[in-house]
Image: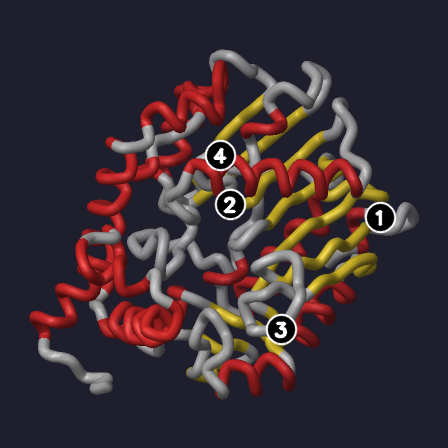
Amino acid sequence: MSLNPHPTLLAYHSIGLLLDWGPISEQSRQTKEGDDMKGLKKKLWMKLPRPAKNVLKTARAVVKDINSRKLRAELFGGDECFVPKLVQMRDGPQDYHVFKASGLSHFETLKKSGLSPDSTVLDVGCGIGRKTLPLLHYLSQEARYDGIDTDAESVLWLKRRIEPRFPNFHFSDVSVHNGKYNAGATVSAANYRFPFDDGIYDFVIADAIFTNMLGDETRNYIHEMARVLKPGGRLLSSYFLTDSQTSTLIREGRSAVPLLHPLGVCLVAEKDHPNEAVGIDADFVFRCHSEVGLNIVERGFGTWSGRADQGNYLDVIVASKPMGVKEGNLE
């Protein structure tokens, strides 16, 4: 099967991939042919320019939204007003089931790590509120939740929907440069200082932000997260972590993300757009934690790399800040 199809065929298969139209989706339901088609779809998708991907994603979300109004009401009930439309979900899968499951999964992880109704929480990369929703009715009025994100449109939506009803929840747009999500900003993520005081949070969540950040950016963010954590606080973060086994799986084409291009301590999917998808050396990430006194207490490999029988999609690290560490000694 040719890997360089005619542009018309490329467009046809891409539309079928995104919108589940016609014989494309029918063929995908068959085992052998479906596997071949999935492989072709993956290659076709990678060949599409970014504007075309964005248009097709939006079209698919609009179609699904029209057909999912009843489902949305059934899944979220009285909290439906705090759930965005699919077309607004630019921070992950555009699916209501996944939106709800993702939030609940993070909530359970936080509770296992010691979250209480009075905890203070910083959500770095809050997106459109996937992790926020389960916390709305769990955190007390004495608790504090701060969500920050580079997507100004998502932050504005959250501020309008949530802050009037939950005054201890706050959302802020941070104008930090990211090649995928905020290319117009001039402030470098490698030098950015979080707009919060030292040692005020029990938990810092950083889900899926490091999959779009390079080495120096990642180091600075981990250092900043350590700075704002209370002694005894915990950092929950996720990555595409790379090591010798992961690199082998990527070269063999068994990973979900083709991180084929080396860039410093990173492997990226697109040389011209490195922030599009970023894997980062696991030892480098461990050193970044150690540099600021964070102890890694739990780590788990995800399924993205092709490792078998792993629970999460991304690789997850849970780290704690020792009780004896003073804020002034973090730098």
> What's the distance in space between the residues labelled 4 and 2, CA to CA?
9 Å
Asked if the residues shown at circle 3 and circle 2 are in contact, with their CB atoms under 8 angstroms apart, the answer is no
Amino acid identity at mark 4: Gly
User: Residue drawn at (37%, 28%), measured in percent from left and top?
Assistant: 157
Corner quadrant of residue 115: top right
Q: Which of 235 and 253 is in front in this view?
A: 253
Residue topped by disc 3: 307
Q: On the picture, is 74 further left or further right than 102?
A: left
Q: On the picture, is 92 further left or further right than 266?
A: left
Residue topped by disc 2: 125
Relative to residue 264, is residue 102 depicted above or below?
above
Lower position in the chain sequence, tag 1 or tag 4: 4
> What's the distance in space between the residues labelled 2 and 1, CA to CA?
26 Å
Amino acid identity at mark 3: Arg
Q: Is mark 1 on a helix, strand or loop?
A: loop
> What's the distance in space between the residues labelled 3 and 2, CA to CA?
26 Å
Judge depth for marks 2 and 1 and give the one in front: 2
Relative to residue 296, is residue 41 depicted above or below?
below
**Percent position (x, y) of residue 212?**
46, 61
Lower position in the chain sequence, tag 1 or tag 3: 3
Asked if the residues shown at circle 4 and circle 3 are in contact, with their CB atoms under 8 angstroms apart, the answer is no
Residue topped by disc 4: 129
Q: In which quarter of the image is the N terminus?
A: bottom left
Judge depth for marks 4 and 2 and give the one in front: 4
Q: What element carries label 4?
A: loop
Residue topped by disc 1: 326
Relative to residue 74, is residue 287 depicted above or below?
below
Judge depth for marks 3 and 2 and give the one in front: 3
